[in-house]
Image (tube, rainbow, N blue to C red):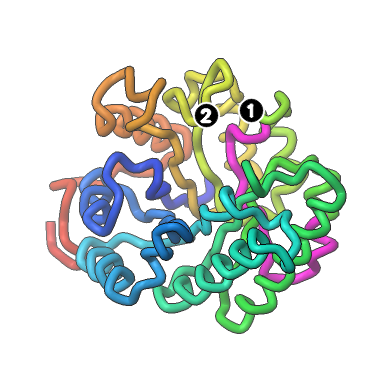
Amino acid sequence: MPSFKLGICEWAFPMPGPYAVKTAAQYGLSGMELDFGSYEKSYPLSVPAVQRAYLEMAAEYGLEFPSMTVDSLNRWGLTHPLTTRAGALAFDGVRRGIDAAAAMGIPVVQLPSFNDGAIHSEEDFRRTCEKIKMACEIARPMGITIASENVLSVKDTLRMVREIGYDNFRIMFDTQNYYLADGRDEAALLREIHPYVVQVHLKDGYNGNLSGSILGTGESGFFRTAAAIRDTCCTEWLLLENYYHTQPLSQLGDPFSLLEKDLAAVREVFDIRKPSGPILRKAGEEG
């Protein structure tokens, strides 16, 4: 079986901010995908002092930052023309996010296409590809990969890869989004697009709830998708994205006890060894 690293998305972790790095390490996680923040809050992760706080905690507790999302694109989407305020704000967030990732040594910048940035038409597709190509051009000399997270069909995903045409472009795959969009077979879809996948978000749900059930207890076919991840060796990083502190999942118990259940499931399915000895140890400390 291939070797996997287990991390979590910052926005899914019950405790956000730099101190979350220490707490994530307590639970044996190896990494955290950061959220660049919102335009309305002036992109906190663009501030050098905030960057240093995260980096200091990561160095102290041995955690990696495998990726960062520009989540503001769900509010100011890539589907807007650059000549509009929304389009200009969207790309400004992308550009500043790439700069922050470069400053922090983060290798992947994820650009989501949901809500305001959802791709519904050919024009949406064209405008999104246009801006991603610009992002790839900026990020390439910095050694940064640009990853699109979307719910396009296999055909349109492969078309996006061809249209963008940069070797630093990849897909951020998600184990529930495609099923939630229109009932698609997640495992079958991954087997078609796996050469272009860079990292994977792990989540599950039922009755149309996003990130709403312990992994493997929902209706998205998690275990079949996990088998496809193992078979294709499409990624090194598995990033938990269940919303442990949000209903309906939060109704099942304490958010950290729910996190532990997902950790146990993922470690078993992907044969990831649980850290031995004391859970929390500073980087380089002896057990």
Distance from label 1 to label 2 (Cα)? 8 Å
The magenta stretch is 160-178
Q: Say left or right for 89 vs 283.
A: right
State the residue lying farthest toward the front.
85
| Residue 210 numbered tag | 2
Question: Where on the picture, by quarter, is residue 66?
Answer: bottom left
Quadrant (top left/top right/bottom left/bottom right) for the C terminus: bottom left
Q: Say left or right for 56 vs 228.
A: left
Residue 175 painted magenta: yes
| Marks 1 and 2 close (CB-CB < 8 Å) | yes
Front in this rendered view, residue 100 or 8: 100
Residue drawn at x 62%, y 42% as measured from the top left:
115
Residue drawn at x 52%, y 23% as measured from the top left:
209
Position of residue 44 measured from the top left corner of the image (x, y, whole percent): 37, 64
Residue drawn at x 38%, y 66% as measured from the top left:
45
Disc with the residue nearer the chain's start (1 vs 2): 1
> Which residue type carries mark 2?
Leu
> In the rendered image, is residue 40 in sight?
yes
Element on which disc 1 rests: helix
Element on which disc 2 rests: loop
| Residue 76 numbered tag | none
Residue 29 painted magenta: no
Position of residue 81 measured from the top left corner of the image (x, y, whole percent): 75, 62
Determine whether 222 is above or below 192 in the image: above
Residue drawn at x 46%, y 25% as measured from the top left:
212
> Which residue type carries mark 1?
Leu
Front in this rendered view, residue 125 or 164: 125
Determine whether 102 is above or below 179 in the image: below
Position of residue 173 measured from the top left corner of the image (x, y, whole percent): 62, 46
In the picture of the structure, the residue carrying the numbered disc 1 is 180
